[in-house]
Amino acid sequence: MEKLKVGIVGCGGIANGKHLPAIKKNGNFEIVAFCDIIKERAEEAKKKYGTEDARVYTDYNELVKEDLAAVYVLTPNKSHADISIAAMKAGKHVMCEKPMAKSYEDAKRMVETAKETGKILNIGYQNRYRTDSIYLKRACENGDLGEIYYAKAHAVRRRAVPTWGVFLNEEEQGGGPLIDIGTHALDLTLWMMDNYEPESVTGSVYRKLADQTEQGNAFGEWDPKEFTVEDSAFGFIRMKNGATIHVEASWALNTLDVDEAKTSLCGTKAGADMKDGLRINRVQYNHQCVEKPDLNSGGVAFFEGEAEREQDIEQRVFYDAITKGTELTVKPEQALVVTRILEAIYESGRTGKTVYFD
């Protein structure tokens, strides 16, 4: 297998928690350049994951000059667009973490640059590669659910506010739970419906619990003064074909109905949800029934196969797209629509008005 030389921009949590271990496991990439505004983080990542002669930078403009096949953009949302565009213009393919960008205009610039340069632009919506997601997508493509006209995108945490990095910083991230985890749920939902034509968006955005001192937070206490984003947000989306999508996203919400990176779908033939594993509900032989597919990889005596994780599949898909010209699972044009809808929810929440699209 051809080994591809790649560079990493952003050596923080998402790099070390997701991409770098998956790149190493893949074995078909050589990480020869690392960049971070904190040089020590880049040097530490090099020691653990880089080639012996890998270079370390604090300026991504220098890294993209390297002889690389691809650049991984793993920075706060604010800089996704500028780094991705610089890399593509320098002749590199790009793997950019979700969300695509902080704003719709930035995301649009990324798509336009990919088209102009002919470079691959992959966005890190790894939940599409989960076993339950792949199964449900096949069911949707096969028409098992019929016309999907109502859906819910679930990204609800009870009390799990991320207290590290810049998650609470509106300037760096563009928002809180909606743009952070709501983006995954919305991406899954649009992908299952294969519907990327929104007509209007109405949103409510709240910062109701952020100033509380008794927080009960899973990740330890947050500083209310640094909490400049919402703690929950909700959106009502009407699609051009009449379909309706409800988006719910929270880091902190007084609820026991907790679900993250999941979707519920209602079609004319059947419905589906990921509430208790994957469940498909329908009427069969004039009786209500629920199908729960067994999605485990094991089952053979004395052998338990190791299931490929979604981040591992993500790396394989990116590698194959570069070396074999195979199709991306996540199209940048699809990620662009996700960003457009998220931005509209924020705008509607701020103005109190419905946002209409052309």
Image (cartoon, grey):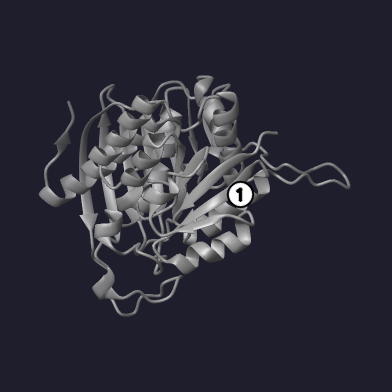
The residue where tag 1 is placed is 22
Nearest the viewer among 128 and 150 is: 128
- Number of residues whose C-alpha sits closer than 10 Å to that of mark 1, classed few (under 14), some (14–19) or many (20 or more): many
Query: Split into 4 quadrants, where in the image is the C terminus?
Result: top left
Which residue is nearer to you in this view: 171 or 232? 171
* Residue beneath the point at 80% across and 43% down: 299
Residue at 29% across, 26% down: 197
- Residue at the image point whose x is 30% and y is 32% from the top: 244
In the rendered view, does 54 fall on the left or right side of 245?
A: right
> Residue at coordinates 49% horizontally, 35% vertically from top-left?
272
Coordinates of residue 89 in the picture (x, y in percent):
37, 35
* Quadrant in which residue 207 is drawn: bottom left
The residue sitting at the bottom extreme is 213
Is label 1 in a helix, a strand or a loop?
helix
Measured as percent of width and height from the top left, residue 341 is found at: 27, 38
- Asked if residue 217 shows in the view, the reply is yes
Q: Based on the displayed image, in which of its 4 quarters is residue 101 positioned?
A: top left
| Residue 288 appears in the rendering | no
Residue 357 placement: quadrant: top left
Q: Nearer the viewer, residue 99 or 201?
A: 99
The mark total stands at: 1
Reply above or below: 323 against 339: above
Q: Is residue 99 left or right of residue 323?
A: left
Left or right: 358 with respect to 147? left
Residue at the outermost right position: 302
Q: Is residue 186 above or below residue 289?
A: below
Q: Residue 312, image x and y in percent? A: 61, 44
Q: Amino acid at mark 1?
A: Ala
Quadrant holding the N terminus: top right
Q: Position of residue 177 (x, y in %)?
A: 34, 55
